[in-house]
Amino acid sequence: IKIKITNIDIPVAFASAFEGEIIRRGDMQVEFDGSRVDCAELVHTVEASEIEDHKITVVGPEVDEMELGSKNSIAYVVKVAGKSMQPDFEPVIERKFHNYINCIEGVYHTGQRDMQRIRISKNAFAAGFRLKHIGEVLYASVKNEFEAVVDKCEVVIYTDPAECTRIRHEVAIPTFNKRDDRLKNLTDESVDVYYSCILCQAFSPSHVCVVTPERLGLCGAVSWLDAKATNELDPNGPCQVITKERPIDERIGEYEDVNEAVKRLSQGALEDVSLYSIMEKPMTSCGCFECICGIEPFSNGVCIANREYAGMTPLGMTFPELASMTGGGVQTPGFMGHGKHFIGSKKFMKAEGGIERIVWMPKELKEFVADRLNQTAKELYGIDNFTDMIGDETVATDPETLVEFLTEKGHPALGMDPMM
Ligand code: SF4
Ligand code: ZN
């Protein structure tokens, strides 16, 4: 018999009302920051005999033993066991940690994997909140939400810096790499089905993401493997199987089956979408795209801006301005929202010539995607160090200067057909 845990034993409140809560530096007791010190959050599948249900262990100092206002390491490993548990479910469960921890009154969480950041407020600390309570929250939430696959759950929270370094480098990063490699070897052609995701219909009612191995959800958080796992965990949930047996136009990636699914899931708001075109029947965007790509007519190319970028783009618009005309679940040819990892994909704007069209992105984003983008450019067009040809804010934020730079670099987009 499985029992729903309705009352989590912690000294502060736990409710979705606290999800948007911000904790300022002056109000914080301690923080944990994966961008500065070794941190990790991980779900790890083990044999039932290896764990004790509801055991919560803290290895290293508790919050009381940390200096007020200090930055510390943290690594929590949620060990799960169950007859129906699969390692593919691990990232889907991990992604929920953000919501769970944010629901704690006086605790703030951002990021994921080994880049999470957590703050505990002075008020929560004064109320008696300690790290073991994060364990209680993770335990209860995972058992509640994933009862179909998790029979037993044990949480180990490391704060000892040497242990955090060990967990991060010897356990967490190899696990993340293995997951990413699995996806890297999959192509849209090598699978039989795609998946829909309608998680964002809560605030963008007609929006449907079609998630394929080479095109992840535009939020950047739902890969094809994640969508597949989400569907297996909850067959009536946000991710549904979409067959791809009746292609209409391979060039733009249009399928009768995909159109039917999108029409049904958007309650008739959308008739047809392509997977690989920004100009013809592009996919819609909700509001949580990691990046926006838009056409830049002077260079026959496209500029990409990521959410973190606060400056101007050569399109004469900032990210928020681009977002206001791209979101809302409607098709806007010439503009599309997408995940960061889509930028290095062979399917990125394939119909318009692919990544060769990219003429500008913020420097930070360019560095983030460089390895994969350069590799794809080499494989598709034989170009070495393609990112060196792409402009950024240190080179130009207006089209004239950008075109001068592209001409100097011999960027291939300049010789391509206009996109409109
Ligand atoms: Fe799902 Fe992400 Fe698309 Fe939202 S943006 S519908 S969460 S894949
Ligand atoms: Zn969204």
Image: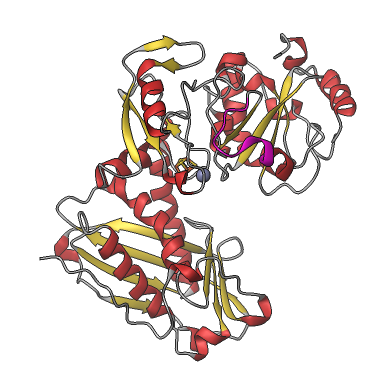
Image spot of residue 296 (x, y percent):
76, 24
Image spot of residue 18 (x, y percent):
50, 71
Dominant secondary structure of the magenta stretch?
Answer: loop
The C terminus: image quadrant: top right
Q: Quadrant of residue 262?
A: top left
Residue at image location 46% in from the left, 49% down from the top = 202
In the image, the segment drawn in magenta is 323-332
Image spot of residue 46 (x, y percent):
23, 58
Instruction: State the scheme by which the image is colored.
Output: secondary structure
Residue 324 lies in the magenta-colored region: yes
- Left or right: residue 6 versus residue 197 is left
Res. 385 visible in picture: no
Q: Quadrant of residue 34?
A: bottom right
Residue at image location 21% in from the left, 54% down from the top = 149
- Left or right: residue 383 versus residue 406 is left
Res. 303 visible in picture: yes
The N terminus: image quadrant: bottom left
